[in-house]
Each structure stands twice: as C-alpha cells, then as structure tokens.
Amino acid sequence: MNDNLTTDLLANLCIVANQTAAKREEVRVWSMSGVERVTFPDGCTRIFKYAKRPFDSEDQALRLAGTLGIPAPKVYHSVRIEGWLGMLLEDLGTPVREADDLDGAAAAVVLHRTRTASALPVLHEERLRALPSRALDHLDQLRKADRWPDTGDIEQALNQIAQAADVRAQGTTLAPFGWVHSEFHPTSLHIGRCGWRLLDFARAFTGPGLLDLASWHGTLDDPDPVRLRVFLESYVTEGGTPDVLAERGGLPAEKWALGWHRMWAVEWFMEQSIRWINDPATDPTYIKVVRRHLSDVLQLLEV
C-alpha cells in the first residue's frame, strides 16, 4: 500500500470537504484497498475508503444504489489519483450485532427488487458460459510469462467445464436477474441502530441474483447445497421470487448457483494473478485456491 498516495487522496478529499486536517484510524487494509475512520477538527467523523483499479468506480455504484433506494452508506466526496479512488463515506458506527441468514435473505430481496441500472456491467448467459474460456485465456498468458507450471489438471478441468457450459449456463436470466452485489457476505451487511446498510459495491453488476445468494456463506468451507437451499427458501419467505428455486441448466438451483459462483471466482482469481496483482510470489496460493474451486465446480455442475 502506497502511504504517500493515500495521504494525497485524503488531502484532496479534505480540500473538497472544506476541512483542514483529519485524524486517521485504521479499520481494515488489504493489498488493493483500505478503510479508515477519520475525525475532523470539529469532531465530525467520516469513513475514508481507498482502492485501486479495478475497484476504482465504487463511488459511482454507491451513488447509483442510493438513488435507486438501496440502503447503502452515503458518498460525501470522491477523488481519483493515478488509478486510485478515495472516498469520504457516511460513518455508520459500530454494528450492534453481526448479520445472520435472515438479515441476508431480507437484504437480498430488497437488492434484487431494485430497478436494473444500465450503467452496471452485465453478466448474461453468453458471458457466464464464457467464464471457463476466459480463465483458459488467463492461464495461457500466465504460461507465456513462465508462470503456473505443472497446471495441466487446471487446463483439463477448465476445458471440461467449457464443453459443458452451453447446457449448464441455461437459465441465467431467470428471476432474480438484476442488481448483483458480488461481495454479498455477512461482513458486507452493516446492522446498526438505525437499520441495515449494504457495504462494498466495488464489483456490483447486473446478472443472476443466485450468485449473491451462493456467496453469502463464503468459499472457505466446502460448498453446502443443503444449507444454500434453506437460505433460498428463507429468501422466498422474506418476499423474494419463488423462481429462485427453479432448476437451471438441468440442475437444482442451489447446485447451479454454487457451481457457477465458484467458476466466477476462479476466473476472477486468475485475472487477478495476471492483471491486477501480477506478482509471481502469490502464484502458489492462487493455484491452490483455483484447484480447490475447480474441483467444486466439476462436482456441483456435474461435469
């Protein structure tokens, strides 16, 4: 993380906010983004969030979400410097509790009912079934850079999924199809004294809402179709469309969702490896995660 650049981002934000200085308190920092709480001389607090490409359009997604009625933190100011985004956001304070499955189901219903936004990228059936082919392209680039050796098993798995994708991607645009948060986890749902807010819209897009529901329980544990089915049924109980339970691509909704969510994650990890992170030192970690997810995809999509 470039400390000088984040200092410049905050300095520019202070100027547009008509503030002279800010006391910084780190909340969370990752390799490509960070969150801090800043306190101004008058005692006012804001959340200072910064991120580099490809996460540098979150301010637009957050403003769009607010305009369309999705509960999200307000963006007060935003600036860009050298491919980095800096934002001053509403400080929602400390959550009163962690979000549970019912909270997640209710929030997903609100999100997926929101009018489709033309400004968001679209993941329709054609793009979904292209994910394994895109991942193969990333693998080819990695190998041309003399990286990712001995990954014939990854290539084979991706080829198998690509061959089955025409059938398995069917049903992509069945409801719910619209806003997809894409980082839909309990940590992205802030439960405060005044209600809930969705955070982290950096990768929002238009697509199958089942990908959000499949992401709720995370990817660290083995995929659990039975657990996801219960979550989908809770989603319907909270007012979501019953079509969320419909079969797609010849598979039960829960297996389709988990399989394609992990394929979506595989393509993203491989793109990170060659494009956004592009650090050979991280290759062993990424290869391990990709292998694990591909094993899940083959099983879930019954390839």
Image (spheres, rainbow, N blue to C red):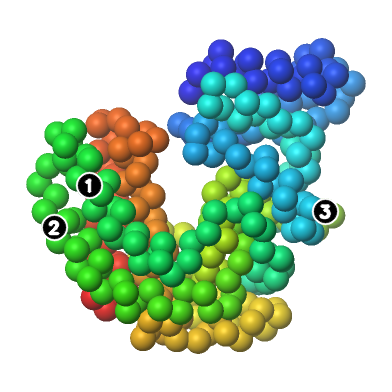
Crowd around label 2: few <14 · some 14–19 · many ≥20 (10 Å): few
Figure check: 34 above or below 237: above
Q: Residue at x 25, y 49 (%)?
A: 137
Mark pair 2, 1: CA separation: 12 Å
Q: Residues within 10 Å of mark 1 (few under 14, many from 20)?
A: many
Inspect the image, locate mark 2, and give the three-letter code of the amino acid beneath it: Asp
| Residue 186 quadrant | bottom right
Residue under circle 3?
Answer: 193
Q: What SS does tag 2 mark?
A: helix
Q: Name the N-terminal-most of marks 2 and 3.
A: 2
Q: Residue at x 15, y 61 (%)?
A: 156
Tell me the CA gap for discs 2 and 3.
Answer: 50 Å
- The spot of residue 54 in percent (x, y) is 49, 38
Mark 1 in CB contact with mark 3 (< 8 angstroms): no
Q: What residue sits right under mark 1 in the picture?
A: 139
> Residue 6: x percent and y percent?
59, 20
Front residue (pair 20, 120): 120
Q: Is residue 44 above or below residue 128?
A: above
Number of the front mark, 2 or 1: 1
**What is the quadrant of residue 111 in the picture?**
bottom right
Q: Earlier in the sequence, mark 2 or mark 1?
A: 1
The residue carrying mark 2 is 153
Q: What residue type is disc 3 on?
A: Arg
- For the residue pair 188 and 303, the one nearer the viewer reads as 303
Q: How many marks?
A: 3
Of the residues tagged 1 and 3, which is closer to the observer? 1
Asked if residue 213 is positioned above or below residue 220 in the image, the reply reads: below
Of the image marks 1 and 3, the number of the one nearer the N terminus:
1
Q: Which mark is residue 172?
A: none
Apparent side of residue 103 relative to residue 173 in the rendered image (left or right): right
Q: Is residue 276 left or right of residue 194?
A: left
